[in-house]
């Protein structure tokens, strides 16, 4: 499922004239211009310590450290 199918846009943006509107057919938009959907930013939800521990116990101890490093990188990229 794509992001567009999962979430509904909160507004629309016309990069040609930098107009933003909640109406996709707004008269502010350039005729025949490209209109892009805008979405709200979702809050980051990471793994809990318990979830990390469960996964590391099912695999190997170093997996928890690797997961934590990946989660930190993802958090950095998404903020």
Image (spheres, helix red, strand yellow):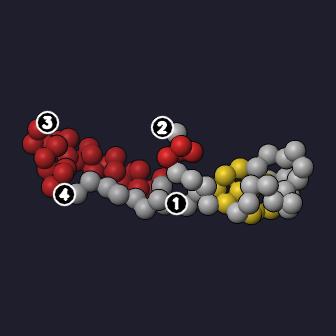
Residue 18 position within the rendered picture, expressed as x and y whole percent measured from the top left: 81, 60
The residue drawn where x is 13% and y is 47% is 54
Circle 2 residue: 1
**Dot 4 and dot 2 residues touching (CB under 8 Å):** no
Whole-Å distance between the Cαs marked 1 and 2? 18 Å
Q: Earlier in the sequence, mark 3 or mark 1?
A: 1
User: Looking at the image, which residue sits at the far left?
Assistant: 57
Q: Nearer the viewer, residue 46 or 56?
A: 46
Q: Secondary structure at mark 3?
A: loop
Quarter holding residue 20:
bottom right
Residue 36 position within the rendered picture, expressed as x and y whole percent measured from the top left: 71, 50
Q: Is residue 78 left or right of residue 63?
A: right
Circle 3 residue: 59
User: Can residue 61 be seen from the camera position used here?
Assistant: no
Residue 10 position within the rendered picture, expressed as x and y whole percent measured from the top left: 62, 60
Q: Earlier in the sequence, mark 3 or mark 2?
A: 2
Q: Dot 2, crowdedness within 10 Å: few (<14), some or many (≥20)?
A: few
Quarter holding residue 12:
bottom right
Whole-Å distance between the Cαs marked 4 and 1? 24 Å
Q: Secondary structure at mark 4?
A: helix
Q: Earlier in the sequence, mark 4 or mark 1?
A: 1
Q: Earlier in the sequence, mark 1 or mark 2?
A: 2
Whole-Å distance between the Cαs marked 3 and 1? 33 Å
Q: Nearer the viewer, mark 4 or mark 1?
A: 1
Whole-Å distance between the Cαs marked 4 and 3? 15 Å
Circle 1 residue: 41
Circle 4 residue: 49
Q: Nearer the viewer, residue 10 or 68?
A: 10
Residue 49 position within the rendered picture, expressed as x and y whole percent measured from the top left: 18, 57
Whole-Å distance between the Cαs marked 4 and 2? 29 Å
Q: Earlier in the sequence, mark 4 or mark 2?
A: 2
């Amino acid at each position: 499922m794509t992001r567009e199918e999962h979430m509904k846009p909160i507004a629309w943006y016309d990069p040609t004239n930098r107009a933003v509107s909640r109406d996709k057919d707004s008269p502010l938009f350039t005729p025949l211009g490209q209109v892009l959907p805008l979405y709200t930013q979702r809050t980051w939800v990471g793994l809990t310590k318990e979830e990390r521990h469960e996964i590391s116990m099912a695999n190997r101890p170093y997996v928890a450290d690797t997961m934590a490093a990946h989660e930190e990188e993802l958090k950095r990229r998404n903020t």
